[in-house]
Image: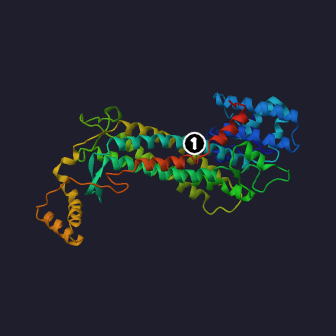
Amino acid sequence: MALKLWEKTVQVNHDVESYTVGRDRDMDMYLAPYDVLGSIAHVKMLNSIGLIGDDELEEIVKGLKAIYEDIKAGKFIIEDGVEDVHSQVELMLTRTLGDLGKKIHSGRSRNDQVLVDMRLFMRSKIEQVVGHISQLFNVLIAQSERYKDVIIPGYTHLQIAMPSSFGLWFGAYAEALTDDLCVMLAAYDVNNRNPLGSAAGYGSSFPLNRQMTTDLLGFSSIDYNVVHAQMGRGKTERIVANALAGVACTVSKLSFDVCMYSSQNFGFLKLSDEYTTGSSIMPHKKNPDVFELTRAKCNKLQSVPIQISMIINNLPSGYFRDLQIIKEEFMPMFDELISILDMTRRMIAEIRVNKDAINDSKYDLIYTVEEVNRLVASGMPFRDAYKKVGLEVEQGKFVPCKDFKHTHEGSIGNLCNDKIVELYNKILDKFDFVTYHKAFDSLAGTEK
């Protein structure tokens, strides 16, 4: 049986229907549990303003909870001929409750219904991503501490530059994730506002209690202006996508470093054999395919905010079907990034470091700055010291002194990993996941 919430007497051409629906039904499967939770909150609000009776509310909520359990058990599908998840939930409810099931749409549009579903979906997925970021962060900090005394050359322009260390290298990516987490928090806060009640973007003549649905769904506040709430479609996804892309950018750079440092020309790192692949023709090959694919996947994810921008660019206020296409590019981002973070964490935890790489004489020139600084500390003007060491290098007379000490914050000898962890945790603590979990448990009847 075909079901479209908007269809009346004229049936749409089949090709037009297929073209306009596209992959929307597949994407809507991501939204199914959130659509039910949003509907429970909505009908409770409708009961509070007298549009649904107490007995009716009890029956509707019971029916919605049964659908929610089917979703959790993997039994929920969007049937052939049913346009979207909203239609499927309403169809299942009316099959059980008859005309009573039709009351759940009072005071809302599919516009604000999908808006709230997307906000709930993004909020839960951001929490999952943050958990995986934290796991990778902890591994990077642990490796930084483990290898803090292992010196490697630092590079500028891919030319050897100054002494670095694996403590600095691992720690740098940990602190980069701290920046990414800060951006993620901002995206989470933008997303964590309730658009339900904005209807098609112009509100409703029913006396809706939007603060009630805000509290029931665990949002931090309301998207107050109903036109603004509708304009958030696409914009919110772009903001969140940018936060996800920031994490992908960090992991992409890390992947490039690992591929380069594990090559024989560098020889700084060795990947575990079980995490490498071979060649069909060269028996000796152990390829860093996982990090190469990770780099490519991360770069692909960084294109999603641009794609969203191109879809929403120059759209005026109000709803347009263009916005539907965003789902196809945006929603899979979360699971892709979670997979990337999980694999990267496993690889980094098992990586082995060459503690003797720095002893190769080709790295002797990284100590020129240390010699300049030693001369300056003994009283020689910097420019004279620079020239003296430069001439020694030109004449092949430079002899490195590898006994040096860095003490300032964030340097080889003072990594400040404890401060980086403190900063990370300070940002992490600002994510309020507890409130929405309590709200979800209350709506679903799963309070502990």
Residue tagged by mark 1? 127
Q: Nearer the viewer, residue 179 or 36?
A: 179
Instruction: Name the side, left or right, on which 107 lies relative to 263.
Output: right
Horizontal relation, residue 270 to residue 219: left or right: left
Q: At 74% from the left edge and 42% from the top edge, which residue is drawn?
A: 216
Q: Residue at x 35, y 51 (%)?
A: 414
Q: Is residue 302 at least partly visible in the picture?
A: no
Residue 245 place in picture, x, y as percent: 50, 51
399 vs 126, nearest the viewer: 399
The type of residue carrying mark 1 is: Glu
Q: Secondary structure at mark 1?
A: helix
Q: How is the image coloured?
A: rainbow
Q: Is residue 437 depicted above or below 252 in this figure? A: above
Residue 211 visible, this angle: yes
Quarter that holds the C terminus: top right
- Expressed as whole percent of the image width and height from the top left, the position of residue 251 reads 42, 47
Which part of the image, by quadrant, shows the N terminus? Answer: top right
